[in-house]
Structure formats: C-alpha cells, structure tokens
Amino acid sequence: MRLNKKIITKIKLPVKKEKNLKLWLNKMLTKSLKDLKIKKLYGLLVHDTSDILNKKNRFLEYILELKKKKLVSKVGISVYEINEINQVLKFWKPDIIQIPLNIFDQRFLKKDLLKKLKKQNIEIHVRSCFLKGLLLQSQLKIGNFKSKNLFKKFTSWCNSKNISQLDACLNFIKKIKHIDGIVVGFDSAKQLKEIIYCFRKKTIFVPDDFANNEKKLIDPRKWKIN
C-alpha cells in the first residue's frame, strides 16, 4: 500500500427534508470542490446506508449522476455492520466500501469477505484503525464494557515488544491483504508525521488474538465516557 493523495468525502441526507434533493446535492458538492480548490473528487461515500436503502428518496440515483458528470471518480458507502454490505450489494455494486477495522474489531476479516469484495473490483478502505484514539491511550477513558482486561493485554504486549501502540495499530492493518486505503485521524502536524513515519517503517508482526466482538467496546456510538 502506497501513500498518496486522494480526496474522499462523505455525504448524508439532510436532517431537514429538502424540496429539491438533487439541487441540494449539487450545491453541496459544488461548495466542497470550491472550498478544496479542485475540479473533481476522487470519492464520494454515502455516510449512512439507510439513506440509499430507501428507494423512494432517489438519493443514490442523484449521487451517481455526479459521477456521470465527472465531478466524482468513484462512489461508495461507509458501513458499520457486515449486513449493510450484503443489503447494498443486492441492488448496487459500490466502487468503494469503507469499513471499521482495528486490532480489537476484526469482524470484517471473517469468511474471506475482503477477498470476495476485491474479486468484484471494489476498493476497500479502512477507518477506525485507532478505534477513535482509544487504542493509543495509556489509560482507558470509557468504562461500560466487560472486556477491560483486553486493553491491558494489548498494552502489555506492546511493552513486551518495545513498540508503541501506534506502531502496533498500523502494522496490524498493513499486514492485511486487499486493503486499498486507510483513514487516520490526527490532532497535529507532528502527530501526522509520526503516523507517516510509522507507516513507512518495516512491517512488524502483530498477532490477531486481540479480536473482540463486544459492541460496547468496538462501536464508539455505544461508548460511555468516564
């Protein structure tokens, strides 16, 4: 996987119902292109799959028109659950599918799902590789889940191998086949440089035995902050 610059953004239906959804969508994209000072987006992802599962709103139809107009190169979806992919693939093949994947959340690695998607020429992008920053913390700040010992197990493993938690998170993703892109969050230019440096270093083996399916841990929407 190479480091390169491709601008991808997400979009969701407006909270307030628009009389002319097609016009609203065009205005939103035009503004984004102007703000970014570019003529075309590499990717436009549907933020919430429920927005396109409802056929009545024609949201997907209007988004695909932007691709025909060459304002967007690729159109895709961002998902939380595997069943969202299965539902969407029944009526449409996205160019890109963005999934959550990290040392704790390994659901999308099951049943050769990524391999099957790649056979359909679908780009696979990974987000949440730091689990919203939780995997980089020295001490947990959420406390409403059962698997607290898992975090201690992970940090202890990092200490025993003398590698940072950042290194471990990135190396876990780097070893996985079929991934085309990684979305990372950062708080400063310094942190971004550190991420790039870690990404470019020689790959370190990170075991996959930290996997956990507890939703209160792997789904940030269900977190309870201490």
Image: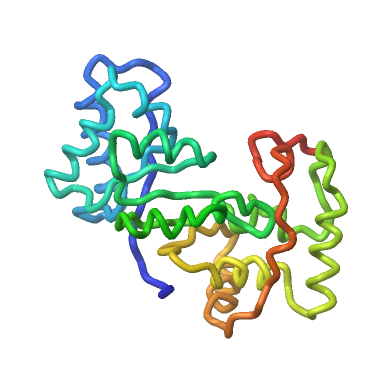
**Which residue reaches farthest front?**
111
Q: Is residue 3 above or below residue 44?
A: below
Q: Is residue 113 left or right of residue 159?
A: left
x and y percentages locating residue 221 in the rendered image: 64, 35
Q: Residue furthest left?
A: 69
Please tell me whether residue 100 is drawn above or below residue 192 in the rendered image: above
Considering every residue shown, the one lying at the far bottom of the view is 202
Q: Residue at x 67, y 54 (%)?
A: 133
* Residue sitting at x 66%, y 77%: 205
Q: Is residue 75 left or right of residue 210?
A: left
Residue 3: x %, y % from top left: 42, 73
> How are the residues colored?
rainbow
Q: Residue at x 28, y 55 (%)?
A: 42
Residue 198 versus residue 150 in the image, above or below: below
Which residue appears at 70% of the width and 69% of the height?
Answer: 207
> Where is the N terminus found, in terms of image quarters?
bottom left
Q: Position of residue 72 (x, y in %)?
A: 22, 49
The C terminus appears in which quarter of the rendering? top right
Asked where in the image residue 174 lies, by quadrant, the reply is bottom right
Q: Within the image, what quadrant is residue 171 found in?
A: bottom right
Above or below 195: residue 153: above
Say whether residue 30 is left or right of residue 50: left
Residue 182 lies, in percent from the top left, at 48, 61
Q: Nearer the viewer, residue 182 or 41?
A: 182
Direction from residue 29 to residue 148 in the image, left or right: right
